[in-house]
Image: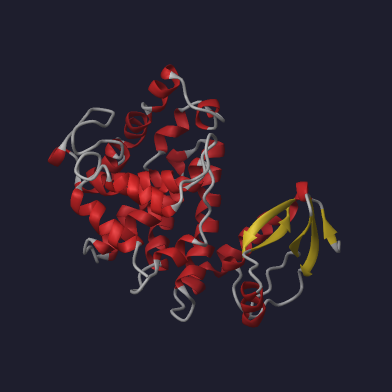
Amino acid sequence: MNATANEEAVIPVSVATLIPETVPAVSLYLSLSDGAARSYRLYRGPEHLVSASDIDNLRSRGVSNLYVAGDDYRRYQSYLRKNLDRLLDDESVPADRRVGCLTEVVRDVLADVFRRGDLENRVEQLKEMGDKTVRAICHDNLVFHELRSVLYHDYHTFTHSANVALYCVLLAKELGIQDREELSAIATGGLLHDAGKLDIPPGILTKPGRLDEREVETMRRHPMLGFRKLSHRRDLSLAQLMMVYQHHEQVDGGGYPVGHAGREIHDWGRLCAVADVFEALTSNRPYRAGFPFEKACEMMISKSGAAFDKEYLQCWMQFVSRK
């Protein structure tokens, strides 16, 4: 067992994904900084139990991430998936810990979909992830800032899709939707909303700078490409397909791919638009860092009734600002 690890060989895992009184079966490392240099010291070996007091101690010290060696990451994913259902059904577990574990699994599933490009055979798995998303946040009195602190905010499409699905469910609940099947369908729609990006060249998706006019035109095809990719499926509803097709439409008609306006945009399309833009503004992009929370809210409020449905945006802003 190595007492240290190299920076190139480690992957961060959120402390929120540790499940009390379990054995992760991997070596966990702490990050140590010495000026510009960074090293990793062994925190727990693969045979050691992680207790609730261990997790509380890490949090009290401000430690939000531990690290696993790259070749241990699949084993850590297996650990999470093995324990996820038990965790989601345990109402004594804080919401942020449930969401942290879920997000780690959902991101991995989506990353594999985008890496392999095999969406056709993975929709059922994504529907299962949609159901688990609802189970993770089905309790009342959720505080948005606590949940957001356990999410990833990088520029990867799979991270964006995982976060948008979560935000869509949170907004739907705030709008008064309580039916679990409907919320699960909304979550699945959120996971699928950027399916068209599977057909966008990676060089455009991850370009470390502003897109040129031709690249913007290519990028703007993804709602239509996603709709074409999924429209033949009888296991997806029209509402879910509209989340894919209309999440970049604007209520004043200024969006794309068609320029639908007002009630021409499906309720779930308008809901997804709010979640999509908020996530995009507050997360990092290849060409910029994420905007601060207050700035992102200010930018969206300035487009209320133009880009966004007034009621949906107001409801979202009230929720994310709640203490």
Q: Residue at x 23, y 63 (%)?
A: 177
Position of 48 relative to 311 (above/below): below
**Residue drawn at 40 percent across, 33 percent down:** 196
Depth check: give the residue in front, 212 or 4.
Answer: 212
Closer-to-camera residue (307/95): 307
| 1 sits left or right of 252 in the view | right
- Please indicate whether residue 252 sits to the left or right of residue 138 in the image: left
Is any part of residue 125 visible from this angle?
Answer: no
Q: Is residue 170 above or below residue 302?
A: below
- The spot of residue 241 in percent (x, y) is 28, 41
Task: Name the residue rendered at 58%, 64% in the picture.
Answer: 80
Q: Residue furthest top?
A: 214
Relative to the observer, which residue lies in front, 284 or 245? 284
Q: Relative to 109, say whether 307 is above or below.
A: above
The picture places residue 293, in percent across and down from the top left corner, at 42, 54
In this rendering, position of residue 225 left or right of residue 301 = right
Tell me the residue at 66%/56% (across/down).
12
Which quarter shows the N terminus?
bottom right
The residue positioned farthest toward the right in the image shown: 2
Q: Is residue 186 above or below residue 319?
A: above
Q: Position of residue 235 (x, y in %)?
A: 30, 47
Residue 244 visible in rendering? yes
Residue 79 rendering spot, x and y as whole percentages: 63, 65
Figure quadrant of residue 52: bottom right
